[in-house]
Amino acid sequence: SHSHFSPRDKGSEVPSESLNFLHLRHTAALFVLIAHSFALSGKMPTDVLAAFPALEGIAPLGVTIFFIISGYLVTKSWTQEPSWIVFARKRFLRIYPAFVTCLIFCICVGSVFTNLKQDAYWQSSEVMHYFIKNMLLQNYPPLPGVFEGNPFKSVVNGSLWTIPIEVSCYIGVLMLGISGLLKSKRRSMVCLVAALLWVVFWGQNINIFGATVQSAALPTYYAAFIFGAIFFQLKEWLSPSMLLSGCLLVVAWFIPSNNFTHFLGIAALGYFVVNLAQWMGHR
C-alpha cells in the first residue's frame, strides 16, 4: 500500500506518535499480505477459515486501518502547515516517487514472467498503458502475457487500486483547508460529519479519476479516512482510554451487521487505533 506521513513533521504533541502509527501500518500491511497470498494462489485455508471465519475479512480490515491512520495524519499535516503548496508538495512526494518506482519495477519484473517473447512484450501498447493509466490514477492492472494463469487473471500489483481513493481523500482535505474550514474545530466537524453522511449514502459513486475500483468498498474506505480526520479534530476532548475503546470495538464486532452498524464499527476501530498509537507512545 502506501505511506502517508513524514516522521519529520513538526509540532507533534506525542513525539513518537508517527512512529507508533508506522508500527500499526506494518501490522495492517501484514494482514493484507496474508490475505492476498491466499487469494492469488487460489488456495484458501479452508480449515483455518472454518475455525476463524473473521480471517476472511482480514485484508479489508488492514486497508481500513490504513485509511484511518491516513485521515488522522494528513489532517494533522495541514493543521501544522496550512499551505496548499506545502500540502500538495508533501502529498506528491509521499505518493509519486515510490509509485513511479513501483510501476517501473512491475514492468521490468513482468518482462521475466510474461508468456510473450521479449520483443512482443516491450512493443506491446499495454506496457505503456500500464504505466500512463496508473500514473493518471485510473488503476490499470494488466501487463501483456503476465500472470494469465492466476485466479485473478493478468492482475499485476492489484493493491494499487486504493491509491486513487487515497488521493481523492487528499483533495478533500485540501479543499477544506483552502476554504479555511479547518481553522475552526466546530466548522471542520460540521463539514466532516456532512462528508461522512455523503459517503455513507453516495460513496459508491465518488470516483473522481474514473479508476477501476471495487465500488462497494468505496464508502468504507472514505468513511475510515473521515473518521481518522474526526478523531484528530477531537483529540483534545476525547480522553485516551484503551479499556473504553477496546470494549466499544468488541461490542461493534458482535453487533449484527447492517449498513448502520458497519459504519459504527469503523468509528469504533478508528477510536481504538488512535488510542493504541497514543498508548504505545507512553509505554
Image (tube, rainbow, N blue to C red):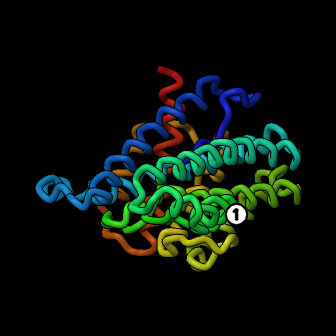
For residue 248, side relative to residue 106 (left or right): left
Mark 1 Cα-neighbour bin, 10 Å: few <14, some 14–19, many ≥20: few
SS type, badge 1: loop
Q: How many labels, in total?
A: 1
Q: Is residue 205 visible?
A: yes
In the rendered view, would you say 21 is above or below 281?
below
Q: Nearer the viewer, residue 240 or 57?
A: 57
Residue found 57% across the figure and 66% down from its top? 124
Quadrant position of residue 209: bottom right
Expressed as whole percent of the image width and height from the top left, the position of residue 19 reads: 56, 28
Residue found 50% across the figure and 38% down from its top? 275
Q: Which amino acid is tagged 1?
A: Leu
Expressed as whole percent of the image width and height from the top left, the position of residue 262 reads: 43, 67
Expressed as whole percent of the image width and height from the top left, the position of residue 236 reads: 67, 39
Quadrant position of residue 255: bottom left
In the rendered view, would you say 92 is above or below 41?
above
Q: Is residue 237 visible?
A: no
Furthest residue in direction left, as rendered: 47
Residue found 42% across the figure and 58% down from its top? 114
Residue found 62% across the figure and 43% down from its top? 101
For residue 3, side relative to residue 246 (left or right): right
In this figure, which residue is indicated by the disc labeled 1?
136
In the rendered view, would you say 89 is above or below 67?
above
